Structures are given as C-alpha cells and as structure tokens.
Image: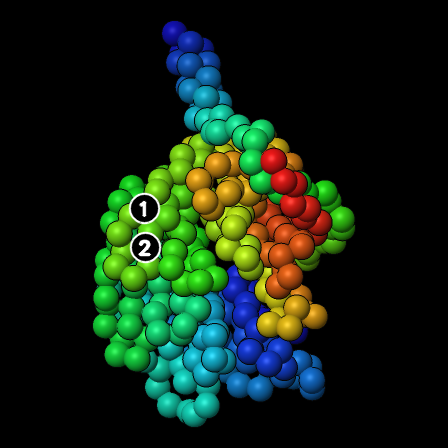
Amino acid sequence: MAHPGGAPSIAFSRDGTHLYSGGYDATVRDWDLGRHALARTFKGARGSIWTLDVSPDGAKLAAAGEDALIRIWDLGRSGSPLTLNGHRRNVWDVRFSPDGTQLASGSFDKEVRLWDVMTGKALHVLKGHSQAIVGLDYSPDGKLLATGADDSTIRFWRASDGVRLRVIENGRHVDKVAFSPDGHWLASGGHARGAVGTLWHELTGDGSDGASVRIWRVADGALVTNLPHPDDVIYVAFSRDGRSLVTSGEDDRFRLWRLQLVEG
Amino acid sequence: MRLHFILATAFALALCACGTAGPEPVAGGPRIQASLAATWPAAGPARQTAFSRDGRLMASSDVPARS
C-alpha cells in the first residue's frame, strides 16, 4: 500500500481489517486489508500527519501533525472531525487513554495536553519538559502517562490530574516510549545528538554510540536493559503478548527482539 | 590563526556530536533480557510499526529513501 510521499504514521482498526496511514501529503488514508485497496481518504490537515491512534472501542480515529491541530473522526459516520485546538507547534504524538475518554498529545511547544474526547476541551496542560515532546504512552491500566522528549528525560505523570510523578534522566533525546502490555516495563528509543550533532552525523555518518533502545522498570524507574542499535531509533513497540519488541530507525531496518523476564 | 579557529570549531562540533553517557542498567531485581530474533529492511528510513489487536498482524511504514 503506497501512501504518496511516505507514511510516518500507521494504526490498525480495532478488528484488524483496516489500516490507517498518515502521510506527508496531509491526508489520512483508510486501507481495506481484505481487498488491498484504498477505502477512503480523510482530508483537511494542512501539513504532514505525524501520529495516528484508534480509540479502544474502535469508533474514533485521531490524527495530528504539522498544523498543530488534532482531528478526531467518528469512523461510523461521515462528516467533519472534532478539532482540538491548543498546541502552538507540531504535534508529534497522540494516544487515547485505555478507557477511551481521554486523549494525550505531545508537541514541539514543550507541552503535553490531556483532552476530553467527547467535548474536545483541554482538561490539563502538563508542563516541565524543556524541549519538544516526541513520544508518549498510557500505561495499560490508564493510571500513568509516560512522555519522552528532546530534553533527554522521560517523565511519568498521573493521568487523572496531570501531576508529575517521576523524572528519568535518559542521557539522550527520546523519540518514542511504549509501555509493555502488563504495564511493568517501559521501552524507549531515541538518539544521542542535538541539532549540531545531527548535522555532524549527516556529514560524517558518525555519532551513534550503538545503544539507543532502553527498557525501564516502571515500579522504580530503573534501567534494566540496553539494546544495541547501530543508528538513531525512531519507534519502539511491544507485541500484544509482551514477548517481543520491534524497533525501527535511521539504519533503514526493523528489528525484532525476543524478551525474557529474569527474576532478580 | 585561521587554522586554529577551524580546528577549534571542528573539535567543538565533535564534542557536541557526542551524547552523555546516561544511566547504567541495574543488576538487581526483576529485569528483562532481550535477544535479537530477526531484522528486515525498509525501503528508506524505517518509521512506525503497529500490531493488530489480536496480535496476528504487524504493519510497518517507511519514508522514501534519501537521495
């Protein structure tokens, strides 16, 4: 399925029969996997779509990106999306809460916002990151929100009221965070360089220290595993059974890791 | 003098290119061990992966290869 210009974001429908892709062409495309065909196209955004998420009940699709707006479509009917307006810069990540009532968004404007999905009102604005928030995820029980940012920290917040609970110094920029299905672990991916380092990397190909994927113990914030990766890591995702982790990045490869619990 | 400036600038850029060390993994308590099981190529810089809710399907996306 070719999304013109490339698709930085994808999400499955709840029943697995459709795949949504968000593209550099400012559209969200709905692909029918049974027919291998484009079913419909969502338009209206004025820039690249960086992030997508489908609500837990499968009824809503959220998309956001370059134009700083978050759009939520009701997949059961046609019509205009609910538009969430508040961020001032690119929105890098959105995620529905496990109960589907809340949506979290992280932005280049250094803010995390928690939204009421029904009304579109901002419930809480979470401040503290000093640079762009690139990745976020809810714990499976919905009690915690983890955010990762260009300020090289991972932060845990209480999802109900946005109170900050823990700050982890990661030592490198964080591009994605993901809770394991049991909620005990958090995986993070990122890169070790700032803007100057990125320029140096582009010029020389040098600058990766080979350990950009990390797994953290949620209970105490301890780092438990470093996974070697030859280049910047863009995305990390646990499999549904929690036994595998898939990572992807700038070395143009996907990696599948088998995970094993070790009791201390 | 000019050579010194160029060398100093290059040295500063090299320093900026390096990340800080960050934390070290802990030895005690429950933890996760990981082993690489498979790799596969993307058409360009690999972007996102997504799993279907039943866990049977995985999708991946990439962007056009750099010219």
Around disc 2, counting alpha carbons within 10 Å, would you say few (fewer than 14), some (14 to 19), or many (20 or more)?
A: some
Residue beneath disc 2 = A158
Position of residue A193 measured from the top left corner of the image (x, y, whole percent): 47, 34
Q: Is residue A102 visible?
A: yes
x 48%, y 29%: residue: B23
x 26%, y 45%: residue: A128
Position of residue A189 measured from the top left corner of the image (x, y, whole percent): 53, 45
Give the side of residue A97 with respect to residue A257, left or right: left
Q: Amino acid at mark 1?
A: Leu
**Could you tell me if the residues under marks 2 and 1 are in contact, i.e. CB atoms within 8 Å?**
yes
Q: Quick one: A252 or A20, which is closer to the camera?
A: A20
Residue beneath disc 1 = A165
Q: Vertically, is A87 above or below A118?
A: above
Q: Is residue B65 visible?
A: no
Do the residues indicated by labels 2 and 1 lie within the same chain of the protein?
Answer: yes
Give the side of residue B39 with respect to residue B66, left or right: right
Chain letter of disc 1? A
Q: Vertically, is A49 above or below A125?
A: below
